[in-house]
Image (spheres, rainbow, N blue to C red):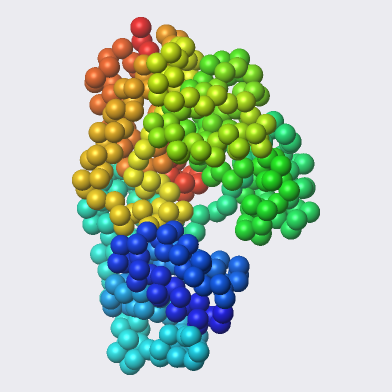
Amino acid sequence: MTPGARVSAAIELFDAILGGEPAERALTRWARSSRFAGSKDRAAVRDLVFDALRQRRSLAHKGGAETGRAIMAAQQFGPDIEQLFNGDGHAPAPLSADELAILASDTPPADPVRFDYPDFLDAELRRSLKDDFEAVLAAMQTRAPVDLRVNRLKTGLAEAQNLLAREHIFTETVVGLPDALRVLENPRGVNNSRAYTYGMVELQDVSSQMVARLAAPQAGSTVLDYCAGGGGKTLALAALMGNRGRLVAHDVNPGRMKDLPDRARRAGAEVEIWTTTQLDEAPDCDLVLADAPCSGTGAWRRNPDAKWRLTPAGLLRLNALQDEVLDAASRYVGPAGRLVYATCSLLACENADRITAFLARNPHWDLQDALTLTPVNAGDGFYVAILTRTT
């Protein structure tokens, strides 16, 4: 595909997404129906779509309309724009004089447009991010780095780094995280690399890795990952425990854990996977991690489609669900155990406010520590709170 043809494909896909089709579904559909597109073409089109999704409002403002054509024209606006929009072959039709004039104009937008977030989140984002408001939201308009967690059950940091380098995947260490590597070159090669195939590394954002470390699971203890999902943090907990103790993974939707058995085998991690019914007979746990369902605002760089699908009513439903998760997860914590609540959200209404509400309902619990992570000080946005019983 020519560069112009890639832009045309991105325009078509973006119009489908604006019409309500989820981004991943649209891209999968296009890839299956476009056998002429090679792997590099598919990757390039995906990047065009996701880069535009991250900046959907600001690009629509610059392009003068919320259409695939206007957004892609704004994204590609520069000295080469007329070579991309030239109508040759499968390239988009040339830009009109009016379109070029709109693209060249410079009308300052309001902050929700300038930083690409829904209007209804304006006050909550300002309350939650305070002095970091602009820096965090500007970071959310860019691509997230690719981070790896070195699996200590199978290898060490230097060994993993050297093995990746042999396949031209170059990395750097991350200060403060002894098992983390940030990919500098060839991130798309990770999934097919020997290090990944043999379970020596896992794709995991540094903030997610930090959540597992802050949970501080001890070797020989009983640990419950209450909202395990795909199991990324479950595997990190297993490595930190050195497979010594009892580690249970649970999710209210067992389908979310369907890949966990294979992932655990590849990683050499010993994990018990339990249904909700089995939890009725769960022993007292030394640690319960509740990585609760949330808005995903902290992961907007990775899933930008999500921010345009979030609604005020949806956020309220998530708050109620987070309260339910905290109350349910707390029942499995032993007398001297700890409850660790986490979200990949930037919003105080999902984070500190939920802890305040939990403590009001449960006065026999104390907040020991809390930490907010953002792209300013880590990777994805995360919140972590550590709670213990007072009696």
> On screen, 208 above or below 363?
below
Horizontal side of 388 relative to 196 (left or right) equals left
Q: Nearer the viewer, residue 181 or 246?
A: 246
Instruction: Identify the image quadrant of the C terminus.
Output: top left
Q: Nearer the viewer, residue 360 or 107?
A: 360
Instruction: Identify the image quadrant of the N terminus.
Output: bottom right
Tag count: 0
Residue depicted at 28% across the width and 24% down the height: 358
Residue depicted at 49% across the width and 59% down the height: 143
> On screen, 88 above or below 312?
below
Can residue 31 be seen here? The reply is yes
Residue depicted at 58% across the width and 26% down the height: 271
Can residue 75 be seen here? The reply is no
Residue depicted at 34% across the width and 22% down the height: 328
Where residue 359 appears, as percent x and y from the top left, is 28, 21
Where residue 172 appears, as percent x and y from the top left, is 67, 49
Horizontal side of 221 relative to 321 (left or right) equals right
Where residue 278 appears, as percent x and y from the top left, is 44, 19
Horizontal side of 306 relative to 170 (left or right) equals left
